[in-house]
Structures are given as C-alpha cells and as structure tokens.
Image (tube, helix red, strand yellow):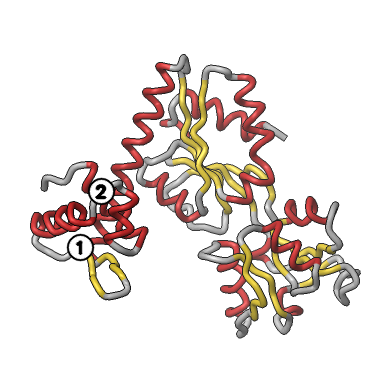
Amino acid sequence: MRFDLIDLRLFLNVVEAGTITGGAERTHMTLASASERVRAMEAEIGVALLLRDPRGVQPTEAGRTLLHHARTVLLQMEQMRRELGEYGAGFKGHVRLMCNTSALTEHLYEALSGFLARHPRISVDLEERTSPDIVEALRHELGDLGIVSDAVDLAGLEAFTFRQDHLVLVVPKGDALAGRRRAGLHEVLEREFVGLGGTSPLQELVSHNARRLGRRLAYRVRVRNLEAVCRMVEQGVGVGVVPQAVAMRCAKSMAIARIALTDPWALRNLVVCMRRRESLPANAQLLLHHLLGSP
C-alpha cells in the first residue's frame, strides 16, 4: 500500500471533522483534492473506508483499522520530530509521560517541576489522556510512563502506587448529608447529580456502580471539568462524585461539604505504570524514581 503521511493526516482529519469538507479544510487542501485522495486510498485497498450520507461520513470497519494505524504513525512521527529537535536545542534526554486529568491537575505539577529543576538537560513530553487510552498506548510502546487510576485493567504492565485518589461525595453546605463523614452511593441514588460530560472514565465508573445497584443516575447537568462539578454542586444543582484532592481544594473557596464514600470502588489509587521497569530508558528511570520518592 502506498499511503503517505498526507493521506494519513487527511483521513484522520476527515473522521474527526465528520465530513470530507471539514477534513479538507483542516488539512489545508481543496475539497476536490481531498475527495480524490480518499477515493484513491479506497481503490488501493479495494474496500470502502467511509460510510457517506447527507449528514457526513463515518469510518467503516476497515476505516477504523486505518484510523488506529494513522494515529499511531502520526504520533510516532511527531515524537521523532520533538526528540530530534530537542537534541538540537541542547537537551540530552527525553521522557514521554502520559497522565490522566486527576493526576495532572492535583498531583503532578509540583513533582514534575522538582524533577525538571534537578535535571535541566532532560525534557518531558507531557500528554493528558484518559486512563484507558494511556494503558493502551503503553502496551503499544507509544510512551515511557503513564499515571492512571488503578480502576483500569493494567494487565501486561508493571505499576507502582503514586498517590491516593479516593473518590468522595460533594454536597452543598446546608444539605441534609453535609454533617455526615461517610456515606454509600446507595444513599444518594434518588438525588439529582452533577456529572462530567463526554466519555469521562470517572463518570462511567460512578454510573456503572449505580447500575449494579439497580438504578440509573439522574444527571441534572454535565460539565467539562471537576472544578465546575463542585461549582454546580455549590449552587444547589445536585450532588457529585469527585476525587478527594479536588474536593479539598474546592472546599477552601466554595460552600460545599465532602463526604467519604464507603463503596470499595471509590477507594482507588493513582499508579505509575510502564511495560517493564528494567527496560525503561535511563531518563525514564530517573523520572520514575523521582515520582515514587516525591511527597
């Protein structure tokens, strides 16, 4: 198959935009050229890559396979450019680190800044992803280290505890539950919830365990980040479930109360994971040692 990087970038942009027109614009290409390239790709492999209808396009099964490999190839090319460029800028080492939102916003900045100050000639390529995406990327050797929730499947990886990341219930101050220290999810299943939008792994975890109790959560509103969850809870819109560190920080400036969840699934940890510790590059070994030793 004779696909070049422009083909792969175009196909990725088309799928993400949902239309060939949108993909062409993102790739800085005319619609006619983009359409011709997509048709040539389909002719090359002999099957349709896109399902077309008046509303736009969606990838076929073959298209989803190509999409996976396109992302992998383009990511590797970008990493190569960054790493080689950093050598030219005077850096002598590079670490590819991926982390989930909770680790990034609540725990990582201080630890990482200390490492970079101690090792001025090592650069860190930091990327925020969901925990399942990080695990999958590490299995395909698309990163050195990942920081994820231990609620995800870590099969095939080594993992070491980085921080506690227990989940808590947040309610408005003055709520009937505000004076409680502990509660179970079953006690609030009748309440309206504030949740995260999109495909948030944290929200799916909460919803999944509600379904195991025989109920579907009633979401009054879904917002983009955890601080917004706490802000909506403060306004009395509903109750929410967030990491303990987020609740503690937000409680300093918001009229909310945090209540420890007694459910076993809420007692989770953040872990640093990798394929094999002994096969890590030397610079990644240094960062791992720093992360595990930092308070």
Give how far across and how far down residue 23 sits, in percent.
Answer: 31, 55
What is the crowding at mark 2: few (fewer than 14 residues within 10 Å), some, or many (at least 20)? some
Front position among marks 1 and 2: 2
Residue 280 left/right relative to 197: left
Give how far across and how far down residue 120 sits, in percent.
Answer: 57, 18
Disc 2 marks which amino acid?
A: Met
Disc 1 marks which amino acid?
A: Leu
Identify the image quadrant of residue 63: bottom left
Give how far across and how far down residue 44 sits, in percent.
Answer: 9, 54
The relative height of residue 245 versus residue 189 in the rendered view (above or below) is above
Residue positioned 38% across, 34% down in the render: 79
Q: Is residue 261 visible?
A: no
The relative height of residue 130 versus residue 117 in the rendered view (above or below) is below
Mark identifier at residue 29:
2
Please give the residue where the numbered disc 1 appears in the rendered image: 49
Q: Quadrant of the C terminus?
A: top right
Identify the image quadrant of residue 266: bottom right
Identify the image quadrant of residue 191: bottom right
Q: Nearer the viewer, residue 289 or 171?
A: 171
Residue positioned 23% across, 51% down in the render: 30
Residue 162 left/right relative to 235: left
Mark identifier at residue 293:
none
Q: Is residue 152 visible?
A: yes
Give the CA separation, mark 1 to mark 2.
Answer: 19 Å
